[in-house]
Amino acid sequence: MVQTVGIDHIVIHVYNLEEMKKFFLKGLGFPLHADYGKEFFVEVGEQTLGFSQGDTKNPNPTHIAIKVDNLEGIKERLTRTGYKVLKNNMVSGPEGVRVQLMP
């Protein structure tokens, strides 16, 4: 029987890779795991989240829920970086990528 431990990584194809880097590295403050030019990964706890240069302006999935240890601090940093935190701690990032901050 195979037992899952957790998510290792998720990769999302995006149109504007540089704007996505700004949102996740500067806005959310995630550590950079790796940058391969047309693809980069950020660390999310023990998992990684990757973004790859694509030709679509409608990336999937609909949102990513991320557990955080300092909800108010991250909300303040996002606001300072120019992003608006919406109802249910949802943040609309570049290209419609939505991130829900979970305490």
Image (spheres, rainbow, N blue to C red):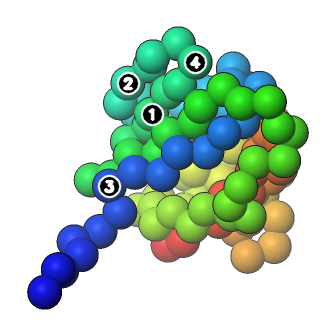
The residue where tag 1 is placed is 41
> Which amino acid lies under the numbered mark 4 shown in the image of this protein?
Lys
The residue where tag 2 is placed is 34
Q: Is residue 65 above or below residue 52?
A: below
Q: Do the residues labelled 1 and 4 touch (CB within 8 Å)?
A: no
Q: Residue at x 50, y 72 (%)?
A: 103
> Which amino acid lies under the numbered mark 2 shown in the image of this protein?
Ala
Between the residue at mark 2 and the residue at mark 1, the CA separation in whole angstroms equals 5 Å
Between the residue at mark 1 and the residue at mark 4, the CA separation in whole angstroms equals 11 Å
In the foreground, 54 or 32 = 54
The residue where tag 4 is placed is 38
The residue where tag 3 is placed is 8
Q: In this view, does 29 lie above or below 89?
A: above
Between the residue at mark 3 and the residue at mark 4, the CA separation in whole angstroms equals 20 Å
Q: Do the residues labelled 3 and 2 touch (CB within 8 Å)?
A: no
Between the residue at mark 3 and the residue at mark 2, the CA separation in whole angstroms equals 14 Å
Q: Which residue is drawn at 80% across and 30% down?
A: 55
Point out residue 79 in the picture as x, y percentages from the top left corner: 75, 44
Point out residue 19 in the picture as x, y percentages from the top left corner: 74, 26
